[in-house]
Image (cartoon, helix red, strand yellow):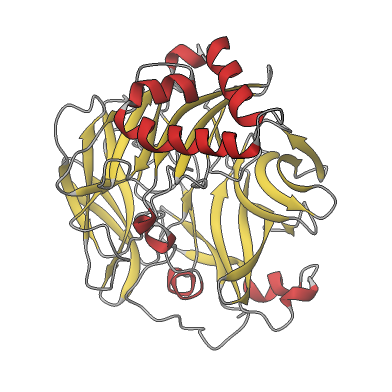
Amino acid sequence: MESGWSHRFRTFVFDQKCVPWRVAQSAGALLEGSVRRRIPALYRRVRLGRWRDLVRPLTRAPLHHFYGYFDKSPWNRSGALVLAHEATFSDRPPEASDAVRVGVVPATGEGGFEPIAETMAWNWQQGSMLQWHPAEPDASILYNDRRDGMFVAVARDLRHGELRVYEKPFYAVTPDGKTALGVNFARLQRLRPGYGYAGLSDPWAGHLSPEEDGVYCMDLNTGVSEFVVSLSKLASLQPDASMRGAVHYVNHVQISREGRRFAFLHCWVLGKGRWGERLCVCDLDVASIDVPMPGAMVSHYDWIDDRKIVAWAWLPDLGGHYIVCDVVQRSVSVFAPGVLTENGHCSFSPDRRWLLTDTYPDRHGMRTLILFQPEEGRRTDLARLVSPRNVWGEIRCDLHPRWSRDGLRICIDSVHEESRQMYSINVGEFVS
């Protein structure tokens, strides 16, 4: 927890208008520059209220390691192993000829990366959608690959090898491991580089919103899939004026906690480097599409339960905030106003009592890792980690914080030690 002394010091130096702006800026630059580099313990004491460093390495150089997105736990059921990708480079986007290894590392951080397989379908943001199989979270993994001119999904047992290859790749899997949802990763790569996979052409590259493309649902027992949401339907559903003549695609598919519903971002290209994003929700058994926050531009989100979502959103009448949306009642309320004020990769702890999030680099190039207790409105900054400017853009390394299954540890990807690596933080002292 932050001490009263450090909080008063930081508030006095950086927040109070009684301190001249130039003095505050100079103090901030000194603290974030030479003090952080030369006296890191003092920096943590001033910025975070503690001397000790909570961040512990899970992987190490010379090779690069990362997990990917923030919506899955890399820990197996026993908590002994953590899934990871291993790459030989980190300074450019992956090309069609680049493979990455998938494997495990000990959750203690003692021991090296143990490779299991290779994949040709991956990116820096979301990896290969590597995850433990929900039906066998100690023994089996799922990931995407590119084989014989197709993106596919693979189920593999850690001891007995490859179990099955599916004819389409996954984006999200239901908690019971029976159903998967997927998208056109070639289209995603073309329209939002860094989230799709290199190596294949988009079959509908000449179409703005094809009827035959969108979100598909796959039965993992039979391998049979069918489209449940088409881009054509999305483009015609409560259309915004900015959608006229735009190219449409889907990103960030996530299934609710109990598997009843799924959400996704319906996106459309506004111009070079610009896009629109709105949150859509469907019932898995009905596949009826709803836009629970009309007019809101939504970024990152997480399901709280089967009907409520927390998200960073920009609303015309409120501006940018974390919000809680009840997708059944279509009600919206601001979450943690004045406390969580920046867009980040948010997720609730397994017991739903704590929110974990991060920030994008500030003017000093620093990302903040944040733990928030909604009932008491208590924010704890766990770490501030530098993100060098040469690892921004498509090859950036967002922290993407994720929870362990018991809610006592978190895992991040970071480049603050000059290579892309995975780190863990024990948060038991804060959440107990």
As displayed, is residue 18 above or below residue 129? above
Viewer-side residue, 235 vs 262: 235
Q: Residue at x 54, y 55 (%)?
A: 252
As displayed, is residue 257 above or below residue 363? above
- Tag count: 0
Farthest residue in the bottom direction? 206
As displayed, is residue 306 above or below residue 241? above
Q: Residue at x 18, y 57 (%)?
A: 88
Image position, residue 341 (x, y; %): 66, 39
Image position, residue 116 (x, y; %): 18, 47
Q: Residue at x 22, y 37 (%)?
A: 59
Image position, residue 425 (x, y; %): 37, 25
In this image, 151 relative to 174: left or right? Answer: left
Q: For residue 16, which quarter of the picture?
A: top right
Farthest residue in the right direction? 317
Image position, residue 328 (x, y; %): 78, 43
Q: Is residue 359 visible?
A: yes
Q: For residue 83, which quarter of the picture?
A: top left
Q: Is residue 286 visible?
A: no
Viewer-side residue, 200 vs 64: 64
As displayed, is residue 381 above or below residue 68? above
Viewer-side residue, 189 vs 138: 189
Q: For residue 277, which quarter of the picture?
A: bottom right
